[in-house]
Image (tube, rainbow, N blue to C red):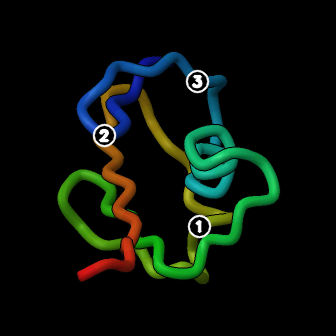
Amino acid sequence: MTVTVNGEATELADNTTIEQVLARHLGPGRAVSGVAVALNGEVVARTEWGGRRLRAHDRVEVLAARGGG
């Protein structure tokens, strides 16, 4: 199925979860502290990432806080 991740069309397997998208997008084992996810314009609680399955044409935005000044 095709979903949009941060503005880019991405092919994913059916029933892919937000957690799986993050592992692919951020890299395996990367800490997710400071990361927020929006699905179709709605923020998804971190506690739901492992169980929230995506559907074709969903829009996922992954936002990561960056330190600096």
Look at the image and tell me in which quarter the C terminus lies. bottom left
Secondary structure type for disc 1: loop
Q: Earlier in the sequence, mark 2 or mark 3?
A: 2
Res 6 label? 2
Res 12 label? 3
Secondary structure type for disc 2: loop
Q: Which residue is mark 1?
A: 49
Q: Amino acid at mark 3?
A: Leu
Identity of the residue drawn at 35% across and 47% down:
60
Q: How many neighbours does mark 2 have within 10 angstroms: few (below 14), some (14-19), or many (20 or more)?
A: some
Q: CA distance from mark 1 to mark 2?
A: 16 Å
Q: CA distance from mark 3 to mark 1?
A: 16 Å
In this view, the residue farthest toward the right is 29
Q: Amino acid at mark 2?
A: Asn
In this view, the residue farthest toward the left is 41
Q: CA distance from mark 2 to mark 3?
A: 14 Å
Residue 18 in the image, given as x and y percentages of width and height: 56, 54
Q: How many neighbours does mark 1 have within 10 angstroms: few (below 14), some (14-19), or many (20 or more)?
A: some
Please indicate whether residue 61 sits to the left or right of residue 53 in the image.
left
Identity of the residue drawn at 33% across and 30% down:
4
Query: Which one is nearer the viewer's eye here, 65 or 67?
Result: 67
Identity of the residue drawn at 65% across and 23% down:
13
Q: Nearer the viewer, mark 2 or mark 3?
A: 2
Q: Earlier in the sequence, mark 3 or mark 1?
A: 3
Residue 14 in the image, given as x and y percentages of width and height: 63, 27
Secondary structure type for disc 3: loop
